Image: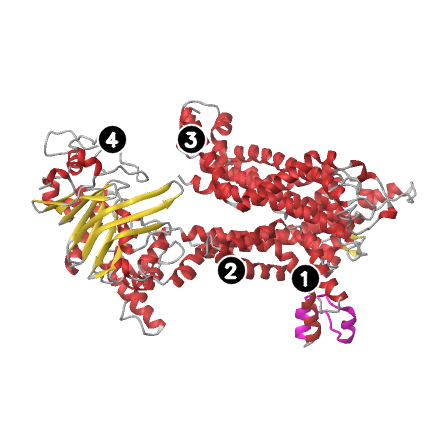
Amino acid sequence: MNKKQTSMFWMDVRYALSLIRRNKLVVAGFVLVGFFLFLAIFGDFIVDPGVAKVVDYPNANKPPSWQHPFGTDDNGRDIVTMVVLAAKYDLAVAFSVISVSIVIGIVVGSVSGYFGGLIDEAIMRITDIFLAFPGLVLAMAIATVLGRSFTNLMLALIVVWWSGYARIMRGQYVSEREKPYVSAAKILNIPSWRIMFKHILPNAIYPMLVIMTMDMGGVILTAAGLSFIGLGPSPFEPEWGSLASRGATYLLQAPWIIFFPGLAILFASLGFNLVGDGLRDVLDPRLRR
Amino acid sequence: MNPLGAYVTERTRPEAIPIIEKRLGLDKPFFVQYTIYLEDLVTLNWGWSRVAHMPVIEALWYRFPATAELAIAAFLITIALGVPLGILSALKNNKAIDHIIRIIALTGISIPVFWLALTLQYSLSYLPKVNGLPSLPSSGRFDPILAQSYPFTRYTGFVIFDCLIQGNLVMAADTFIHLILPSITLAFLSVGQITRVARSSMLEVMRQDYISTARAYGLSERVVIYKYALKNALIPVTTVSGLMFGGLLGGALITETIFAFPGMGQLTVFAISSNDSYTILAFTVLASFIYVIINLVVDLLYAKLDPRIRY
Amino acid sequence: MLLRVQDLVVEFYTYRGTVHALNGVTFDLDYGEVLGLAGETGSGKSVTAFSIQRLLPSNARIVSGKVVFDGVNLLDLTEEEMRLIRGKKMATIFQDPHTYLNPVFKIERQFIDILAQHDPEVAGKSKTEREKIAFEKAVEMLKKVKMPAPERIMQMFPHELSGGMKQRVLLAMAYSLHPKLIIADEATTALDVTIQAQVLEIMKDLQRERNVSVLLITHDLGIIAENCQKVAIMYAGRVVEFGPVTKVLISPKHPYTQGLIRALPRTDKEVKPIGIPGTVPDLVNPPTGCPFNLRCPHAMEVCKTKVPPYFSEDGVNVSCYLYVR
């Protein structure tokens, strides 16, 4: 990129930032996301990670108090601690699932969209098979087969998510490959893989950015849902969904066990959705140039 | 996952294991197993459900109407609320009501299903009851005690329908009331999605040139919006509603469990905790099948709405 | 005088600042006349058209000026009153026929709706009767614009017709209500030359037959020369020269018009086309004084500071200090 392009890029960034600053909701979203990121990264230093593994029955199911602002769960563990500790795991799951899915999606989608023909047909049929299953149902089926653990949860979610991305990327590549800059690159004898990833990808990826951000929220929700029905990690690994799941039995006596982890999920997810929504507002009119 | 896991425990005699394997067909090569699987699938021989103590297909068949009633109710609520809200939001773009609706929609897609279910249960069912106020039922499909005073026979399994044709208004009403909380829960997530799609679609349409033409010829604003704009705007909404149905099927798992609603989802969740793979597998296949059919219907509907697409 | 536009000033509010789209547009159009509104892209031609109809987007504002149509200042009317005029007294044919017809409705639906809205013969009767009368009228109009098989066309969807056919449908719709003024906003720009000729031919016939006034907006001076009696040349949101076509195009007075004529390729003389140096000014920060002063070979001191008013010279109105008395 030459100098003019770089300066135009920074102008865009500054404009984007100004738009973002004006929209209070989006700012709130960034705050939320930042907050949870902070908890995820520094959680182990703020609270005592050992609490997760300890069982303290006499203290079980105590309502919120000064010592335990969110109360205690059925194992006597302080819920504030548990929620904070779980942040790391839930966000890690979300990040990994999205990043791996998008990589797979890009590779598959670009090959399918760029080359077309039989490869395209074959790949699309395979993607269709995965897309034929409703998300949670497929993830549930896979997680059941693989067994209860964090990694398996992630794998199950990746299997569900990649096909959606592949399809979108394929659509993008199909429309971009007709464009003049691609023909120009081909005439210049630039190798295909370079065209696909250095030329087309930066253009094709725009709509994906918004989707990816909002899907962070989606993955957190789905992961929590899966944990809730029993497919998440073991009870000693803190995860918002499984915390809530244990609390369901005690809804009437100790509603706080579900309430606070669930609230955490809500706000984390909301944060990402707000950011994604704001991103969409920013990117959309700019694209119409 | 060990396929024997559901059938073999520490108490099984070691000599029995090869017999069980043989019975389950696990000694045959993989390809043959797969063919048998396909055969069984098509002939509806879906195995025995341990959690239901009956063949899987019977268990699912028995519970299907309950889930269907729930899903349809949720779907209707979603469309009835989501579309008007989205369009209203688009028409009053950037005004206060637009922002409020957008926030509600955004919250809708951020809320965990189980949290909403439990919160609703707690606040609309438990709290009022404890304080002597009228409350909504928190579980089940209908009140079994009431059913004894007002018995009804099960014809189709769609209880509301069955009761109505038998003239049993009491039970019909009771079942209806029991549907309220679960369907609201299920609908909430989807309403958010539909509202957002309806809103952005309507905004996009209102920007189009043919709307200018309509206005330039003096057509009244009402006609412009409700006739010219709306039909175009509803096209993407239709597509999304098909996809959203998939979410309903998934969400049903959690919702039915929490509200002790006797549908397919509840059965599947029991199956998960008991490792009953036959049931889980059957539900997955069935749910996907339904999802595919719904999307097919949606595609056909889409072709009807948009004359540019013809098969 | 059917239409008199005086000193129209219009602004758009965008994230980049306030765009001064129109900076004093003045011209008039008599009954039965055809006026050409010429100018480059961005000169404000379409904005003028939209302003006359008051169909500007929500981020635009008509700051000042008058638009007197058939004796009434349109800028004073309410939206309801405007709505009664649009379509009935003035109709527009837009540039791109592909996007200006609603893709999900049949042609008959869009046509009938327009007739049903305004035509007094149609209003007040029962729905089936309304539809029948409107249908017949529509078919009549389609025949007038030389559409083959008009009944079949009515049953078709826009995407099933070619560009030229779509434009003729829009023409038919515009004329069907017998308006006094037709605004043709680059109506032929998107068509290829042969279709263009056809459409212009039809417009000419209709215009003569019904004595309709036409505001023909285009950047093609050739079309203006062939079809218009008067022409207004626009530059950077201002009318710089306005008068009879013969006078303006053959002996242009404003330096910009002269530049435009010089830039045309000629088949009658051995002269190469000469471009106008410089670029169109940025309407967010328009230059002070005459908008053309930065590119004008005859620019004087006063041109840089004050916007020149209109001076009458040989029957033509020119906004240029070269013609000050």
Dot 4 surroundings within 10 Å: few (below 14), some, or many (20 or more)? Answer: few
Which segment did they paint magenta?
B136-165
Label at residue B181? 1
Residue topped by disc 2: B84
- The mark closer to the camera, 2 or 4, is 4
Q: Under tag 3, what secondary structure? A: helix
Q: Under tag 2, what secondary structure? A: helix
Whether callout 1 and callout 2 share a subunit is answered yes
Pointer 2 indicates a residue of which chain? B
Residue sticking out furthest to the left: C314
What colour-coding does the image apply? secondary structure
Q: CA distance from mark 1 to mark 2?
A: 22 Å
Quarter of the image where one finds residue C33:
bottom left
Question: Which kind of residue does numbered mark 2 sit on?
Answer: Pro
Label at residue C278? 4
Asked whether B98 falls inside the magenta stretch, the response is no
Q: Residue sitting at 65 percent across and 60 percent down?
A: B183
Residue C167 in view (yes/no): no
Q: Under tag 1, what secondary structure? A: helix
Question: Which kind of residue does numbered mark 1 sit on?
Answer: Leu
Quadrant occupied by the N terminus of chain B: top right
Q: CA distance from mark 1 to mark 3?
A: 53 Å
Question: Which kind of residue does numbered mark 3 sit on?
Answer: Met
A129, above or below C28, in the image:
above
Pointer 3 indicates a residue of which chain? A
